[in-house]
Amino acid sequence: MLPASKVEVANAEVSAARDLERVVVGADGLRSIVARRLGRVFTTPPRRLAFTAHVSGVRDVYDLGEMHVGPSGYVGLGPIGDGVTTVALVVPFKDAQRGARFFEELDRFPGIAGRFDPARIVRRVLATGPFARWSRRPDASGGGALLVGDAADFFDPFTGQGIYSALRGAELAASAILETLATGGAASLDGYARARRREFGSKWILERMIGIAVGWPALIERVVGRMARRPQLADLLVRATGNCIPARLALAPPVLAGLIL
């Protein structure tokens, strides 16, 4: 027979394993089955679709990414090595048919027109969206399930928040699960929702504001013009969207006023 101390440890490990089995983590992306089963998914405007491809030999692409905003959508370019560039065309959901004319649509943006050779596509065009899908709560009331990454909320690709949100959200989820297991399953996972609000609340607001501005070319041109004349504002905004400083600093009234006035 095992000593009493070892029996207690073994029982504790079995109990923890059983508790862990009762925690379901929905990290299954934009079309999360877990989120739908929890019944909390909804959408908010602006609703957009993205069409992406890998293209080699794109002219004038260097080490930096590019964003090109037009009257009805935007294009992002990101070099990934070996002369290949990720090219993303993002359009309103109602204009989904534009994805079938991928390279023709790219030529509608003056800053990138004529820079692509359709014959040099190395990965076919893929589609994702619509974006702006949210879960009303990233955790199940009373514990038992939680959502991470795109399953919980989807950041517009213009600001590139998705990877950070997924990784940081996973850290918050792990802490919540460990706390639940440490209390023998008695504690709920409600603290996870609060932790996400503290971590991402300001970033959600900033990202939504940028998303609306991108759909309003006159406004985005005004903001870009202000940032060109005030590099300190451009630096602050880039650092806030790049997770280098708290997003709330970019939401300060003097900063917002400087970007549009």
Image (tube, grey):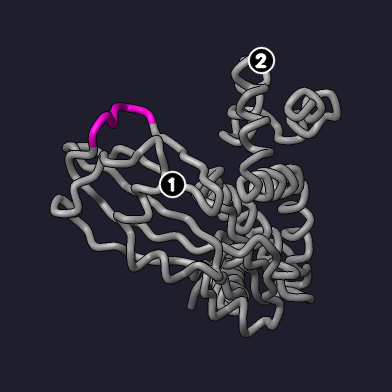
Up-down relation of residue 80 to residue 178 (above or below): above
Quarter occupied by residue 119: bottom left
Mark 1 or mark 2, which is nearer the start of the sequence?
Answer: 1
Does residue 7 appear in this view?
A: no
The answer to whether mark 2 and mark 1 are in CB contact below 8 A is no
Residue 253 is left or right of residue 168, and the answer is: right
Residue drawn at x 23%, y 34% as measured from the top left = 59
Comparing 50 with 73, the one in front is 73
Q: From mark 2 to mark 1, how far is it between C-alphas?
A: 25 Å
Q: Amino acid at mark 2?
A: Arg
Q: Amino acid at mark 1?
A: Val
Which element type, helix, strand or loop, lies under badge 2?
A: loop
Up-down relation of residue 94 to residue 66 (above or below): below
Q: Is residue 155 magenta?
A: no
Q: Which mark is residue 230?
A: 2
Percent from the top left, x then y, of residue 176? 68, 59
| Start-end of magenta stretch | 59-64
Residue drawn at x 17%, y 37% as measured from the top left = 82
Q: Secondary structure of the magenta portion, mostly?
A: loop
Up-down relation of residue 146 to residue 109 (above or below): below
Which element type, helix, strand or loop, lies under badge 1?
A: strand
Q: Residue furthest right?
A: 253
Quarter occupied by residue 185: bottom right
Percent from the top left, x then y, of residue 104? 32, 55
Q: Which mark is residue 75?
A: 1
